[in-house]
């Protein structure tokens, strides 16, 4: 494409700015001021919060809803560091990391903020590239952040998921029936072999035992498929107990050992604390890591490494599952928690939906950082002490 044709009218004017006289320069400034005012008016009527940050995390622009969500005065216009105005959001976006560390191409979060009021927000952040830099390796000069207040949506989320589940139940049931067909055929064949062996005059105990073992394994696989199906359509209330998150992760890795060793994948544990204790349902938390680790294993090539990093901060015990696999496309990143959305050939599309539901029921957070071709980081945050637990303890103390 001819570079002259791709230039905007404003670029052409600015390119000849030295040739403008005082009158025309004043007209240009007034025109730019009017256009800026128009854009600000448009952005202020948008229901989503919009923030623009420079490379140092300084808030250079915010629309009206953006200022409301992070607790700034509606008339406030001076520049301010985001980690001062909204420390929870700044930490979630990774602004506390070294600026020389590699950054994800796109970030999507669902998180809870406590100031100026307790709200649930969905965050979508994309780096801003320097238009004048090298196109092959553009410089990142800032961050555009879009925040959607989903508090009311979360209040109705259970009903929405139930509605989605009912409308799609026939498709899901057809998929489950197909999955059940293969092990049932295998069981039938081996039972016939076992029957012939038992009818034979000469006993063949080894052959019969092998067939029995195969039948048992296939029945167990059937049970796993059915259990997964039932958990998806009939979620149960979590049975909260004090559990060691590290033990849950290690047990989940052992469960997937056959799959992991089959692809010669190395699981590297990086424990930031010896006993990261949380209040949670053992089976449900195990299901979360079973799904997330399974996705990481599916995403990487044979002989790769998957890192699992655990630690804690003032409010959360966290775990990150880090892979350097195929990553997630920009257009798909915002859909990872949608029911029945999958990019896998044999995926059922409910794995991350279940993760999202369980984390919500545990008053936790789940975040996904990904770049296509580079890998994915799934961050799971469990509250060190849940709000319901705090309320219970407060009531007991008052009594």
Image: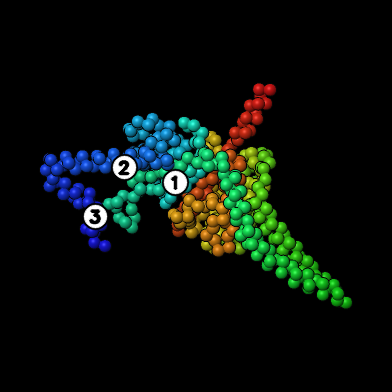
Furthest residue in direction top, as rendered: 398
Crowd around label 3: few <14 · some 14–19 · many ≥20 (10 Å): few
Left or right of 165 on screen, residue 223: right
Q: Mark 2 to mark 1: distance in Å?
A: 21 Å
Q: 149 or 215: which is nearer to us?
A: 149
Q: Residue at x 33, y 53 (%)?
A: 138
* Closer to the eye: label 3 or 2: 2
For residue 39, the mark is 2
Residue 214: x and y in percent read 74, 66
Asked which quadrant contains residue 23, the reply is top left
Q: Residue at x 57, y 47 (%)?
A: 160
Tag 2 or tag 3, which sits nearer the N-term? 3
Q: Mark 3 to mark 2: distance in Å?
A: 21 Å
Residue that carries the numbered disc 3 in the rendered image:
7
Q: Mark 1 to mark 3: distance in Å?
A: 29 Å
Crowd around label 1: few <14 · some 14–19 · many ≥20 (10 Å): some
């Amino acid at each position: 494409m001819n570079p002259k044709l791709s230039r905007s009218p404003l670029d052409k004017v600015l390119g000849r700015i030295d040739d403008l006289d005082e009158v025309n320069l004043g007209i240009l400034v007034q025109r730019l001021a009017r256009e800026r005012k128009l854009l600000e008016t448009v952005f202020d009527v948008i229901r989503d919060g919009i923030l623009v940050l420079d490379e140092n995390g300084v808030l250079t622009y915010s629309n009206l809803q953006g200022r409301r969500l992070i607790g700034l005065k509606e008339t406030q216009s001076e520049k301010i560091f985001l980690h001062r105005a909204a420390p929870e959001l700044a930490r979630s976006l990774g602004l506390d990391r070294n600026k020389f560390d590699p950054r994800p191409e796109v970030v999507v979060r669902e998180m809870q903020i406590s100031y100026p009021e307790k709200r649930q927000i969905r965050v979508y952040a994309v780096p801003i590239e320097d238009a004048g830099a090298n196109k092959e390796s553009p410089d990142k000069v800032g961050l555009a952040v879009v925040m959607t207040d989903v508090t009311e949506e979360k209040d109705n989320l259970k009903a929405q998921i139930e509605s989605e589940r009912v409308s799609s139940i026939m498709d899901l049931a057809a998929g489950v029936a197909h999955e059940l067909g293969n092990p049932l055929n295998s069981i039938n064949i081996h039972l016939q072999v076992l029957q012939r062996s038992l009818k034979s005059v000469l006993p063949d105990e080894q052959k019969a035992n092998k067939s029995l073992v195969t039948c048992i394994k296939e029945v167990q696989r059937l049970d796993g498929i059915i259990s997964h199906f039932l958990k998806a359509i009939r979620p149960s209330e979590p049975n909260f107990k004090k559990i060691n998150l590290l033990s849950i992760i290690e047990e989940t890795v052992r469960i997937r050992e056959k799959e992991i060793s089959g692809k010669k994948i190395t699981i590297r544990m990086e424990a930031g604390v010896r006993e990261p204790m949380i209040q949670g349902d053992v089976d449900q938390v195990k299901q979360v890591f079973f799904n997330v680790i399974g996705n990481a294993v599916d995403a990487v090539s044979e002989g790769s490494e998957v890192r699992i990093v655990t630690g804690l901060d003032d409010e959360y015990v966290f775990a990150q599952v880090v892979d350097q696999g195929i990553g997630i496309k920009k257009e798909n990143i915002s859909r990872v928690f949608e029911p029945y959305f999958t990019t896998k050939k044999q995926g059922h599309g409910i794995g991350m939906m279940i993760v999202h539901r369980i984390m919500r029921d545990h008053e936790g957070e789940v975040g996904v950082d990904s770049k296509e071709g580079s890998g994915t980081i799934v961050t799971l945050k469990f509250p060190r002490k849940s709000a319901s637990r705090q309320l219970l303890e407060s009531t007991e103390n008052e009594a």
